Image: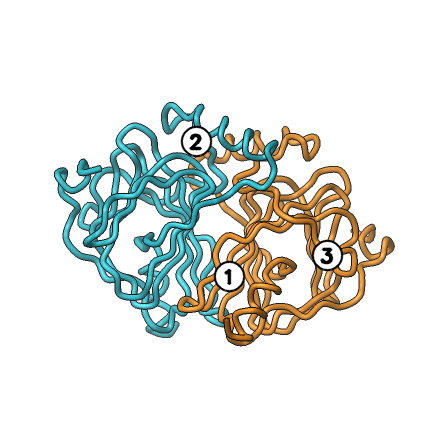
Chain colours: A cyan, B orange
Amino acid sequence: MKNTTLVLIASVFFCFQSCKKVESNSNTEETKEVTTAKTENKNSSEDLDFIFPKGQKGPDKNFTGNAYNYGIVMDSTLTTIVGNVYFEPGARSNWHTHPAGQILVITDGVGYHQMEGESIQVIKKGDAVTCPPNTRHWHGASPEIGMQQMYIVPNTEKGIVNWMEPVTDEQYNNL
Amino acid sequence: MKNTTLVLIASVFFCFQSCKKVESNSNTEETKEVTTAKTENKNSSEDLDFIFPKGQKGPDKNFTGNAYNYGIVMDSTLTTIVGNVYFEPGARSNWHTHPAGQILVITDGVGYHQMEGESIQVIKKGDAVTCPPNTRHWHGASPEIGMQQMYIVPNTEKGIVNWMEPVTDEQYNNL
């Protein structure tokens, strides 16, 4: 197995992102009502929908609290990695960057994400965020409700993730 | 707006895929039970979960039945497109190829996909499929239960999709 492949496999388990938020806009009232109702009824992570298995717990050196990663696709021809992370309430990543950027899609729950120098944004089911290359950011669940997120790492030949320092309680609570 | 950008925007609304199936393997019994139970209880498309808005109906020239596309992310820096397609029961795409390949993730329901020369595969909530570049294939919902799928088009600078002829009833029913 090539070194590049090993790096990809090792990195995907702890690879997360978010940044520029792309709000989902309902174009049918019926669908919007269904989505809103389901999101608002999430009172705890016990209510969250699991599309994928829970996955493996991310290491304490890269996360505060409990975050679980499940790898979905690693394809060297398509130079793309896809996975899912389940954050328990209060859990969040460290600060980190992605050399080639990343896309994050929230499939259930409520969370936060923040780019350095910007305010925390609240993200929820149906939202998507994109992260430009080499931009410092973090993301995680809200304090009361967990978050299910799919991540997409494009152009993996440029790199996956560079981990940095933890997000402090002061930073996390500065909503 | 550059021509390349226009092509991307126009193409994303009718851009779908699937091919090499990647089964999701539960590593916690609890999660597997939840996922299985939810999938098995889908008796019609009325029961499917809508993470995103329903979107716009795909044109008859590219689809048989009713399929709806919702664009989630188009990012030229990340050279990636992400969207969601909701297929009503019995709906399917025409045969088509993707110049740079594609990834498909099923978030709810049950569907089919087939690469030319291979058997139809059944795909359901939690499954993922990858499509190599320039491979003829089609996909859609099962006859009785609809399908919610996210699609990821990587390396969009190489192209998005090339549409071909419809999937006949004989091909669709040859499970």
Q: Nearer the viewer, residue A64 or A19?
A: A19
Residue B154 x %, y %: 50, 66
Alpha carbons under labels 3 and 2: distance apart: 31 Å
Q: Chain of mark 2?
A: A
Q: What is the number of the mark on residue B93?
A: 3
The C terminus of chain A is located in which quarter? Answer: top left
Residue that label 1 marks: B81
State left or right for residue B35 relative to residue A145. Answer: right
What's the residue type where badge 1 is placed? Ile
Q: Chain of mark 1?
A: B
What's the residue type where badge 3 is placed? Ser
Q: Secondary structure at mark 2?
A: loop
Number of marks drawn:
3
Q: Residue at position x 22%, y 58% from top?
A: A136
What's the residue type where badge 2 is placed? Leu
Q: Secondary structure at mark 1?
A: strand
Q: Quadrant of residue B116?
A: bottom right
Residue that label 2 marks: A48
For label 3, the crowd category at 10 Å Cα-Cα, with few meaning under 14, some 14 to 19 and many 20 or more, is many
Residue A46 x %, y %: 40, 26
Q: Residue at position x 42%, y 43% from top?
A: A106
Q: Residue at position x 86%, y 53% from top?
A: B169
Alpha carbons under labels 1 and 3: distance apart: 18 Å
Asked if the residues shown at circle 3 and circle 2 are in contact, with their CB atoms under 8 angstroms apart, the answer is no
- Is A68 located above or below residue B167 in the figure? above
Q: Earlier in the sequence, mark 1 or mark 3?
A: 1
For label 1, the crowd category at 10 Å Cα-Cα, with few meaning under 14, some 14 to 19 and many 20 or more, is many
The N terminus of chain A is located in which quarter? Answer: bottom left
